[in-house]
Amino acid sequence: MNDIREGVRKRYGSIAESAGSCCGYTPAGGAPAAGAPSAGAPVAPPGASSCCGSAGEIGLVNGYTRSDISEVPEGSNLGLGCGNPTAIGSLREGETVLDLGSGAGFDCFLAARRVGAGGRVIGLDMTPQMLERARANAERGGYTNVEFIQGYIESIPLPDSSVDVVISNCVINLSVDKPQVFREVARVLKPGGRMYVSDLVLTRPLPALLRRSVALYAACVAGAMTRSDYLEAIASAGLAGITIVSERGYPLEVMSADPSLKRIATLVRLLPFLRRRVETVVSLSVRAEKGDERPG
């Protein structure tokens, strides 16, 4: 457990310390200042790469708009997600939103615009370098309704029934105890609160050769649960109204673009049985809610 967690922390700490995204992409010109989005602004120069291509290109694939990408501070979109939980979240003004594994703050900043000045957004991350980067981004963007705190998603440092919405983007699969994460989500949600997550899951289990790779675990693949187990973990935590909002394949090309995974990707390409297994990885967006819990 500790080896896996440390591997994840090391990977994402290195990403946060790099000039740009996980493969060193630095936005040319960057996004305009928060509050002055330009829908036509370039999101990345041709050929710029993150762990899965340019951060902007990945954002578009994951369901973000060019306006979403351009309205946040430069350096907050690292291209690390696999969906767009803020898009399916139907966030409302005045709500308190918790982002599990908030990274450099991309989804937090989008949520902050939606909940307004009367709302509050809390980003939770275990990696000091990511927190430092996110806080700098928040200061640069002038966000007064966003804060970033350090902690583990298996033990959320917030009181019971304290948030309206929990979001997370390709992070829960990194936990070594995913059922506990969902129990924590249920605990911190207010009665009637909602959860919106995007994550990687499997249509069938990976072979042991791939499951044992810490690098592949930190890249959100080896630790992924099967779709059925993932949904069961949500239900077992006491969350209801579970709905699959979207589901799409997670191509091998995404994994191949990550320098830390090139050897594994080459092996997968050369061995057809491994490739067939890797092609069972899908990106899933799910919503659920906590019961009202009112008597009568």
Image: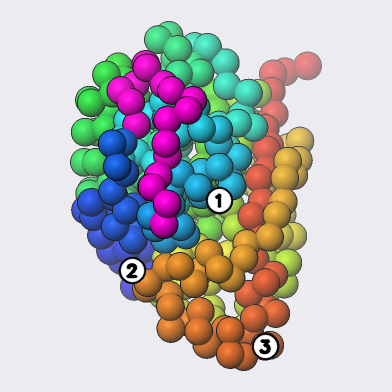
| Residue 84 on the magenta span | no
Up-down: is 67 above or below 259? above
Q: Which mark is residue 272?
A: 3
Instruction: Tell me whether circle 1 and circle 3 mark residues in contact (CB < 8 Å).
Output: no
**Among numbered discs 3 and 2, the one appearing first in the sequence:** 2
Q: Residue placed farthest to the front in the image?
A: 46
Name the amino acid type tagged 3. Pro
Which residue is label 1 attached to?
A: 82
Of residues 132 and 95, the one drawn nearer to the viewer in this rendering? 132
Q: Is residue 168 above or below residue 211?
A: above
Question: What amino acid type is highlighted by mark number 2?
Answer: Gly
**Element carrying mark 3:** helix
- Residue 172 coordinates in the image, percent (x, y): 51, 53
Which region of the structure is painted magenta? 31-47
Question: Whole-percent x and y of residue 208?
Answer: 57, 85
Q: In the image, residue 4 lies at what x, y percent? A: 38, 70
The residue singled out by tag 2 in the image is: 7
Instruction: Return the disc, 2 or 1, that comes first in the chain's sequence.
Output: 2
SS at badge 1: loop
What type is the residue that disc 1 sits on? Cys
> Do the numbered discs 2 and 1 sit on residues whose CB atoms are within 8 Å?
no
Quarter of image, res 41: top left
* Residue 36 shown in magenta: yes
Q: CA distance from mark 1 to mark 3?
A: 25 Å
Picture residue at 68% right of the left edge, 37% below the top: 288
Q: Nearer the viewer, residue 226 or 295?
A: 226
Q: Residue at x 43, y 9 (%)?
A: 118
The answer, for residue 195, to whether it is visible in the render is: no
